[in-house]
Amino acid sequence: MARTHNKKQDKSSPVDKDEDDSCRLDKWLWAARFFKTRSLAADAVDGGKVRVDGDRAKNAREMKPGMRVSIKNKDMQIEVEVLALSNVRRGAPEAALLYRETEESLRVRQQAQESGSDHFAERDRGVGRPTKRQMRDIQRFTGRD
C-alpha cells in the first residue's frame, strides 16, 4: 500500500517557508522578539505604540526590508530598520538578524541609561502615596474612623 506524501515533511514546500516576500507587521514584531505574544504586538500596534516610516500602522501592514519601525513601550523606546522578514519566531540570535537599530536610537538609549531616566517609575516603598496601613494610622490619629 502506497503512502501519501506529507507536505509538512517536504522541506521545499511553501508551507514551511519562514522568510517570505510578505509579512504582517504584528507577526514580524513577534518574530523579531519585541513582544512575547502576537496578541501583545497587535495591541501595541492598535494602541499607536508602533509606527512604520513615521506613520501609525495597522496589524496587517505588509512589511518590506528597508522600512523603519519605531516601538514605544513602558520599558523602552527603540527605532529599527527592517533587514529581513520572518513569519516564524526563532531564537534571539536569529531574531536579531531581522533588524538593525538606528544610530540615533542607540545614542538616546545610552543617554537614558547613563542618566538613570529609564528608572523613572521605580520608587521606594512608603514614599509617595500612603500605604493602606499608613492610611489607617492617619485616620486613627486625626479621629476620622
Image: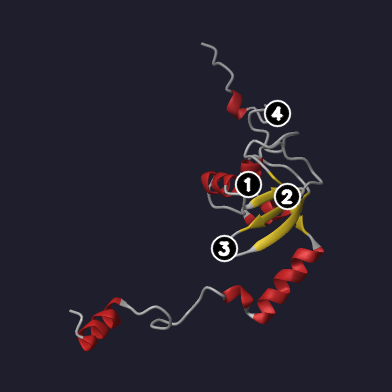
* Amino acid type, residue under disc 2 in the picture: Leu
142 over 36 or under it: above or below: below
Quarter in which the C terminus is drawn: bottom left
| Cα–Cα gap, marks 1 and 4 | 21 Å
According to the picture, the residue beneath numbered tag 2 turns out to be: 98
Residue identifier under label 3 = 74
As drawn, the residue found furthest toward the bottom would be 141
**Looking at the image, which is closer to me, 39 or 132?**
132
In the image, what residue type sits under mark 3? Lys
Q: Mark 1 points at which residue?
A: 31
Disc 1 is placed on an element classified as helix
Q: Which mark is residue 44?
A: none
Asked if the residue under mark 2 is in contact with the one under mark 3, i.e. CB atoms within 8 Å, the reply is no
**How far is mark 1 from mark 3, CA to CA?**
20 Å
The residues tagged by marks 3 and 2 sit, at their Cα atoms, a distance apart of 23 Å
Q: Earlier in the sequence, mark 1 or mark 3?
A: 1
Alpha-carbon span between mark 4 and mark 2: 22 Å
Q: What element carries label 2?
A: helix
Q: Which of the marked residues, 3 or 4, is nearer the chain's N terminus?
A: 4
Element under disc 3: loop
Q: Which amino acid does label 1 sit on?
A: Ala
Identify the residue at horizontal 66%, vertical 55% (top origin). Answer: 71
The three-letter amino acid code for the residue at tag 4 is Ser
Q: Do the residues labelled 2 and 1 touch (CB within 8 Å)?
A: yes
